[in-house]
Image (spheres, coloured by chain):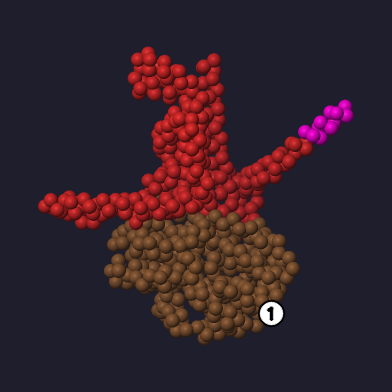
Amino acid sequence: MRRRPLKLNRRQALGGMGAVGLSFTLPKGARAQGNSVSFYNWDTYIGETTLDDFTEATGIEVNYDLFADNAELFAKFRGGNPGYDLIVPTNDFVERFIAADLLQEIDHSRIPNLSNINPGFMNPAHDPGRQYSVPYMWGTIGIGYRISETDGVPDSWAYLYDSDQYANKIALLSEPTTVLQMAMKYMGHSLNDWSDENIAAAEALLIAQKPNITAFAPDNGQDLLFAGEVDLAQEWNGDIQQVMLEDDDVGYVVPNEGGLIWEDDLCIPVGAPNPEGAHELINYILDAEAGAQIADYIQYATPNDAARALLPDEYNQNPAIFPPEAAIAASEVALFPGQEVLEKIDAAWTRITAA
Amino acid sequence: MESFRSNIRVFLAFFAPSFGWLVLFFVAPLVIIFLYSFGENVSLTEVETTWTWRNYSRILEPEIATLFWRSLALSGMSTIVCLVIGYPIALVIATARGAWKPWLLLAIILPFWTNLLIRTYALLNILGNRGRVNSGLEWLWERGYAALDAIGLNATAIMGEDFEPIIFLGRWSGVIIGLVYVHLPFTVLPIYAALERLDRSYLEASLDLGASQWRTFRSVLIPMTMAGLVTAAIITFIPMLGSYLTPALLGRGQVDMIANVIERQFKGANDWPFGAAMSLFLLYVTFIILAIQAFASMRRRGADG
């Protein structure tokens, strides 16, 4: 999905491999022994030395594996926990994991650093009271654009979904749910309103726009933007932010109609071999110092107030990391739509690709 | 009696590992997929085998049927291109001097030494709107434009204002190029084998008896290597039909084939029964193709003998 190395070479093929669902990582956690914890995370979504520092501080070894997207994560856990102690699903998938009874409750008394988290994050719709999840990072989905090739700021989804102004210079994400959600936002509906009419209207909009679209990009929209293949890319803010650090000619905007606000959470799956270790690792990640180091490295927005206090203005005031209030207000958090709707979304997507 | 028993043990010792392997990693998974394909989702994580035909009947829905036809069409077209390109290549290798042959064959197999993903990324680099092909064409376009300008013609009126790149990625053309590139070795090798077995004196006889080169090719060479051609077509076509990576990357999500839809059932759509039904349907199609070939070759042999 997202997450590219920031200080590593962004053009590594590895991210792409994951993006097309070809990660053959074996669960190293399955053969964990001694005091160790198995952490299953997104690519380049942790501080440079965080895990080593944790081992040094606690003596607990970390087995670290990577997954490429939420759907893959869920598919791996469907048949039972392959041996992980800590996973990082996105909010609507946290909901899906909870609905499938795949997460264990978090023991708040074991995580004193929870007090570092901004209170606004402690009672979300997808997990009231934070019984099963601890917030890790959050962000938005918006439009990354090439400043010199666009006529002003492309601050509407219309440029991507309903216009030929940038024909064949447009990349949308390849995740059916997200692409349809943003179409629904454009048409003025809530992105959680999966009525049949809304799905049909979003589908019609996309079929009509398809000739103008260059790619449904599996999380490499920022690469296409960077390479000049497209001028507009629907993407996660962190991905665009990483390109912006390399390329002054790239901007990021959350459209006026609003985008999607997502949040990735730390969760302990049922069947975790070492839940105590997982709690300790969560507590360590929530530490002010460690949290600041992670956020500074991966350039995503942290819900950790104590960590933010340690970070410079260029992080805290960066509109690509923390979008303006109005954009946030117009945006929404996705809820898990349920299995029946998932099948409708997939059928609509198949019709779009078959068109 | 004693020796028979010990022979049985020896037989089992050799037979059991491969049989066990086949059952464990081939038969058992297929049975599980078969059961899934007649199942229904009863919760987010559980499938119950209810012997419903719904998953199979959904394959007939227009959008899925369209994608099956598209997969057949893309694979069919790519196979034809492979045969047209592959035959001359095989002919060159078969007629090359002895010392050259191993090197030419090595050149055909060489791409397999590199991971498919890496090769596909290389194709992305070559075929992109700003890729090697288009930047080469743009270079030519600029030279042409300057030349027309220099001899006093209105270059803009003839060639347009800007260079328009040829779009390969996200189009059928890009996917076909990718499929041909990946599968061409599968086409060349069986044709080469057939040509190698061919008795050259038939060709000489045909030419001596006054047939033209073309006539010899059409009436002698092609019929006598037909078995190799059919094998080549089949082992090129079948893996193409299930291609996943090539349409995913070169099709840029716009030219999905059936494997891409199957993948989504196991991930985003979380609908394993439907994915299982489509996987098995693809398997049935493969069986049918192989059965037709077996039948045809039996008849051919019957006709010959």
| Extreme-right residue of the structure | B2
Relative side of B296 to A202, left or right: right
Q: Quadrant of the N terminus of chain B?
A: top right
Relative side of A187 to A267, left or right: left
Secondary structure of the residue carrying tag 1 is helix
Q: Observer-nearest residue: B296 or A238? A: A238
Q: Quadrant of the C terminus of chain B?
A: top right
Residue B37 makes an appearance in the image: yes
| Extreme-left residue of the structure | B152
Secondary structure predominantly adopted by residues drawn in magenta: helix
Question: Which residues fall within the magenta stretch?
Answer: B1-11
Question: Hey, what amino acid is under mark 1?
Answer: Arg
The location of residue A331, given as percent across then percent down, is 44, 73
Q: Which residue does the numbered mark 1 point to in the structure image?
A: A110
The location of residue B140, given as percent across then percent down, is 26, 51
Chain in red (letter): B
- Residue at (31%, 59%) from the top-left corner? A167
Q: Observer-nearest residue: B108 or B258? A: B108
Q: Chain of mark 1?
A: A
Q: Is residue A238 magenta?
A: no
| Image vertical order of residue A29 relative to residue A320, above or below | above
Q: Observer-nearest residue: B238 or B227? A: B227
Judge the density around disc 1: few (<14), some (14-19), many (≥20) Cα neighbours within 10 Å: few
The location of residue B212, given as percent across then percent down, is 34, 20
- Residue at (41%, 44%) from the top-left corner? B176
- Residue at (41%, 78%) from the top-left corner? A319
